[in-house]
Amino acid sequence: MKTKSYLDQFYTIDPEAGDYFIEIAIRDYDDIFNNWDSSVYNLRDLDSSLKSFLEDCSQDIALNKSVVLRFNIEDEKKEPNLEKTIVQGIRNYFDYNYHIMKKKLSDRWRKTLSYVLISVLFTTVSLYFKTSMQSEVVDQIILQGLTVGGWVFLWEAFSMLFIQSSDLLKKRKQYRRLLAAPIKFRYKEK
């Protein structure tokens, strides 16, 4: 007998494909988007509680699992053209966030490279001064300051690259998965 995982209690799983369904209950199409945004559906911002819900669910489910977004709608009749527009709006939202994460990562890696270069510069200058300086107190303070500065910049680069970037990488993968997720609509029978 196969043991169910903890998440299996909270998510519907497609027995054939193994996809996790993220079930979203709404009254009508307008509940998907921010009520303050008067743009057309395919350019509107998502409702803040829906954003939080989708991001939380995406964090729950392992990144190697596929997800399907299924909207369970109470007070609407099926409108295929409107569904397509809404799907495009949701895709636009996740595409935008995916590109923002890519830009943040790119900026972070650029900054990391500059910190490594500054570290190398400080360390090189300190090694040069080590051979040419007298043993006066001021010279030793400058030498120690350059050495410590080099190590601090190197640590900051290491921290940004391996510690701080991991959250952004994970977030970017989550947005990529949500961007690729099939979106389905199910209507309540009246």
Image (spheres, rainbow, N blue to C red):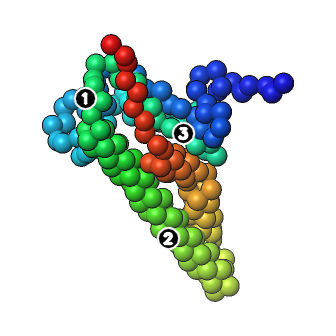
When the figure is inspected, residue 148 is found, relative to residue 174, above or below; the finding is below
Which amino acid, by three-letter code, is at mark 3?
Answer: Val
Name the element at disc 1: helix
- The answer to which of marks 2 and 3 sits earlier in the sequence is 3
Q: Can residue 8 be seen here?
A: yes
Disc on res. 82: none
Which amino acid, by three-letter code, is at mark 2?
Answer: Ser
Distance, label 1 to label 2, CA atoms, is: 46 Å
Residue designated by label 3: 67
From the viewer's perspective, is 142 left or right of 15? left
Tell me residue 130's x, y (percent): 66, 80
Which quarter of the figure has residue 2?
A: top right
The residue furthest bottom is: 132
Disc on res. 114: 2
Q: Can residue 104 be seen here?
A: no
Name the element at disc 2: helix
